[in-house]
Image (tube, grey):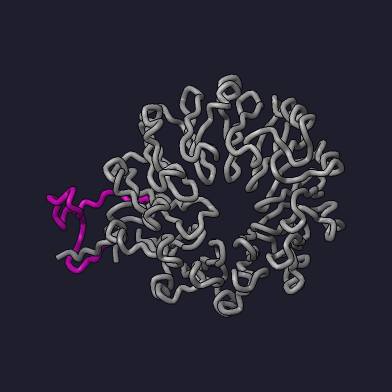
Amino acid sequence: MRALSQWGSVGRCPATKQSGNASAEQLGLRHGDVITVVRMALQDVHPTKFPGGDRGAFAALLGGGSVVAWGHPRGGGDSSTVKGQLRSGVATLCSTGHAFAALKVDGSVVAWGDPRRGGDCAGVQDELTSGVRTLFSTRYAFAAVRDDGSVVAWGDPQKGGECSGARAELAGGGGVATMASTHSAFAALMEDGSVALWGKSREGGSRWTASGGQESETRLREQLAGGVKSIYACNASFAALKTDGSVVPWGAAYCPAQVLEDLAAGVEEIFSTDSAFAALKAGGGVVTWGPVERGGDSSPVRAPLQRGVQTIFANQAAFAAVLRDGSVVTWGDQDAGGDSSAVQAQLGPSDVGVRAICGTDSAFALLREDGSVVAWGDRGRGGDASAVADRLAATPAHTLAATGAAFAALLEDGAVVAWGFGNAGGDTAAVAERLSGGVQAVSANEYAFVALKGDGSVVTWGYANAGGDSSQVQDQFEVVTVTAS
């Protein structure tokens, strides 16, 4: 078989309808040659935002800037109302939990999905016809940053879709540099290092904090007036990392006075579960805060977290810290991976480094540099990989992906194996043959997986209504085989 193109860089083939006048001889084809023509290069697959529940969807960005969507029709899987606007020119995609927004190369924005959660931008359409630079989202709303630095928001007005209360802060900070979001609030980091907030007050949309009263709010206003270099978020709380290495937390996650002292200097990066934070300090030490049951208390493993921590991973309720000696230390919800004693022998010091740790909502899967995989946590939601242990032992894994309750491992030979809750993607029986090879990447939303194959096709599995069934749009990923005569 003569390969004229590969996935990811598929050009127009002279044998297609667009160049139908070219002869086989002109193309260098001989009798019996078989070529594969991919109708449209698949550039990216974007899922709805976690957690979106069982109303999830996917949107695929194809070559030429066209978009194909599938999944729950009220969760962004039905783009028929804006089909004409998605035929070309789309540059990037953004999502809430139940809607998508497409930023086009001309600076305009197209939205679809649940109208209450960002799928309807009619109320601000005049401000989205041109000049938009980038898009951000909460779980319920979108925010567009325009070239002039202004912000346009839409979706649930109580959860980030209305930013009029932050106009002064947004106008006075020299323009938006970037944004972070909780489920229901935005925090815009301005070019001058200040922070603008809007959305649900007690989920980070104001300077309210669970750790204090009016005095605390006044202090927060001063602390967020400048010097912030990055912002981190969990479901209902933010943490700002300042240029001096200090951290400013606000929102629902309680941060005791002693922890605030520990966060006064030396912090390099911050990680989070759904409700708690872990700050990694310059010496490799870790400071945690938030609900105990979600990882906010690391005292049971304090000794190994004093120094030598390289990086931290998290699922919804537990943390996993990778130490410089290759070992892994866990804490948080014991049933969600915070207790790794059952696999401790495989998580001890090792010369084989950790490539990544992936999480469902309540389990972990570790991928080492040699391609070996270790899983632990909730056995029914990905913590037990015994059903595919032989496959994982026979062929090294290349990457891991996860829905809320299942894992998928892309193996070095291009095959995919999955485990965990069957209806969330842990069962690949219906598509096993199509996943036996040729896969180049795997993506996921909360309930379904999508595999991108080298021939330009896609394979989906998991909960059908959340994107696990892509049969209605498969013809748009069609792979055509032509035999020269």
Tell me residue 401's x, y (percent).
Answer: 54, 61
Q: Residue at x 30, y 52 (%)?
A: 40
Going by the image, does 485 lie left or right of 334? left
Image-quadrant location for residue 15:
bottom left
Q: Nearer the viewer, residue 485 or 249?
A: 249
Tell me residue 171's x, y (percent).
Answer: 56, 21
Q: Nearer the viewer, residue 406 or 398?
A: 406
Tell me residue 259's x, y (percent).
Answer: 83, 44
Going by the image, does 59 lie left or right of 136? left
Which residues are the magenta region?
A: 8-36
Q: Residue at x 65, y 45 (%)?
A: 236
Q: Residue at x 78, y 40 (%)?
A: 211
In the image, residue 77 lies in the stretch drawn in magenta: no
In this view, 419 is above or below 131: below
How many numbered marks appear? Answer: 0
State the quadrant of the N terminus.
Answer: bottom left
Q: Nearer the viewer, residue 10 or 258?
A: 258
Can you see residue 292?
yes
State the quadrant of the C terminus.
Answer: bottom left
Image-quadrant location for residue 191:
top right
Going by the image, does 154 lie left or right of 104? right
Can you see residue 107?
no
Q: Residue at x 42, y 64 (%)?
A: 468
Q: Nearer the viewer, residue 35 or 173?
A: 173
In this view, 218 is above or below 268: above
In the image, residue 24 lies in the stretch drawn in magenta: yes
Going by the image, does 302 lie left or right of 108? right
In this view, 425 is above or below 387: above
Report the predominant secondary structure element of the magenta stretch: loop
Image-quadrant location for residue 383:
bottom right
Tell me residue 343's x, y (percent).
Answer: 73, 72
